Image: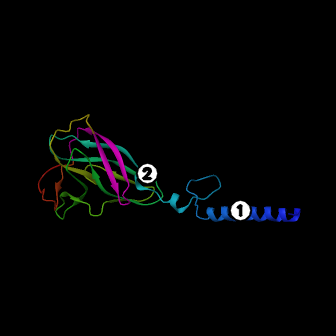
Amino acid sequence: MTIKNITTTRFARLGAIVAVGALALTGCTVVANEPGMEPSTTAAASVAGDAVVVHDAWIKAVESGMTGAFGELENTGTSDVTVVSVATEISHMVELHETVETETGEMKMRQVEGGFDIAAGDTLLLEPGANHIMLMGIESPLVAGDVVTFTVTFSDDSTLEFDAPVKDYTGANETYDDLGHEGMDH
């Protein structure tokens, strides 16, 4: 083989290696934010369970029956999220509730259809007399100082777990609307 043929063969091999490498890289996307690089759509789209942060969570103390859980759910992500359900071991029935004023001026609670929406960058307040997490069928007393673990499920099927202390609280004794619990206070 002459020197010319050896050089041509080496450049051909090098060209083939570069072409195969470039072809392999075309399927890759940037997932992490690196200095000077734009994030991909995958990185920009938030997973709800990672984007939401719970602040000041607490539960109203109760002997048995029903109670509410309150706090703030902050969406730190870049996409809107929807809380579709909440679960806890202390209650066999947990619902997302809102409190509305009736035509007679009475405040009544009812289940929220479709869940709680939280816009990107916004905070959902869960408080007595307003939006809250309703726990029903509680069989053992919840006393001040107890801590209860909750699991929130979002519309993208991601989850978030948080703990909430039980506190003594009097007030927000609304009645239920269209839940079959009419007249029961919370």
Query: Residue at point 18% right, 41% down?
Result: 62
Q: Is residue 75 left or right of residue 104?
A: right
Query: Residue at point 33% right, 54% down?
Result: 153
Query: Residue at point 83% right, 62% down?
Result: 6
Residue position for label 2? 50
Membership of 83 in magenta stretch: no
Query: Residue at point 35% right, 46% down?
Result: 161
Q: Earlier in the sequence, mark 1 or mark 2?
A: 1
Residue type highlighted by circle 2:
Asp
Note whether 85 is above or below 162 in the view shown.
Answer: below
Is the residue marked by circle 1 packed among few (<14), some (14-19), or many (20+) residues within 10 Å? few
Q: Residue furthest top?
A: 145
Secondary structure state at the residue bearing disc 1: helix
Note whether 82 is above or below 64 in the view shown.
Answer: below
Residue 91, horizontal then vertical, whole percent? 20, 47
The residues colored magenta run 148-171
Residue type highlighted by circle 1:
Val
Of residues 37 and 15, the one nearer the viewer is 15
Of residues 35 and 59, the one nearer the viewer is 35
Q: Are marks 1 and 2 in contact (CB under 8 Å)?
A: no
Q: Quadrant of the N terminus?
A: bottom right
Of residues 133 and 140, the one nearer the viewer is 140
Question: Which of the two marks, 1 or 2, is nearer to us in this view?
Answer: 1
Q: Is residue 45 left or right of residue 114?
A: right
Q: Residue furthest right?
A: 3
Residue position for label 1? 18
Residue 129, horizontal then vertical, whole percent? 25, 52
Residue 186, horizontal then vertical, whole percent? 18, 49
Residue 53, horizontal then vertical, whole percent? 41, 48
Query: What is the spatial separation of the Cα atoms under label 1 and label 2, in whole angstroms?
Result: 39 Å
Is the residue marked by circle 2 packed among few (<14), some (14-19), or many (20+) residues within 10 Å? few
